[in-house]
Amino acid sequence: MEDLIHILKSKIHRAVVTQAELEYVGSITIDKNLLEAAGMHAFERVLVSNMRNGNRLETYIIEGEAGSGTICLNGPCAHLFHVGDEVVIMAFKITNQSSVGHYKPVVVLPEDMNKRWQLLS
């Protein structure tokens, strides 16, 4: 039987944090348009890395308003990420080892405070 592995499904690379809400249960709120571009979904588990200070955390996605540019770290992670920080948001999937050679993740490069983006091909 072939081994299954976790690989990068998609990432939003260098999005700008627009909010950090400490008094919230937890998670990351992401503009719906960015989610769709990256193939990510509400309640999906993601790894978030802070380009400024190196902090990393695992949380789940809450869908934000389309076109808002929202990247909001909620709850305790608001201590680790601040407005203006650039972040990398990564989603993973499980696949067969043999399919890795033919696979390429979706990479979204946000611009204009997360309201526009380019897809890296």
Image (spheres, rainbow, N blue to C red):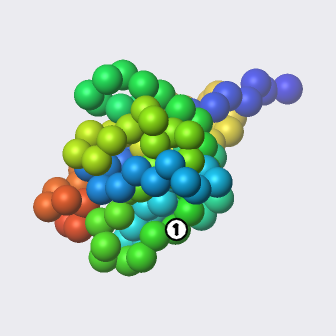
Residue 41 visible somewhere in the drawing: no
In the image, what residue occupies the spot 29% across and 30% down?
51
> How far from the left and from the top, in percent, is residue 105?
43, 44
In the image, what residue occupies the spot 28% across and 47% down?
83
Query: Helix or strand or loop: what does disc 1 sit on?
Result: strand
Note whether 30 is above or below 48 in the view shown: below
Q: Is residue 8 left or right of residue 66?
A: right
Note whether 33 is above or below 41 in the view shown: below
Give the residue number, with chain letter if any, for mark 1: 63
Q: Nearer the viewer, residue 110 or 63?
A: 63
Picture quadrant of residue 112: bottom left
Q: Is residue 99 left or right of residue 112?
A: right
Residue type at mark 1 is Glu
In the image, what residue occupies the spot 67% across and 28% down?
5
Q: Is residue 40 left or right of residue 60?
A: left
> How far from the left and from the top, in percent, is residue 113?
19, 59
Q: Nearer the viewer, residue 4 or 12?
A: 12
Q: Nearer the viewer, residue 17 or 101?
A: 17
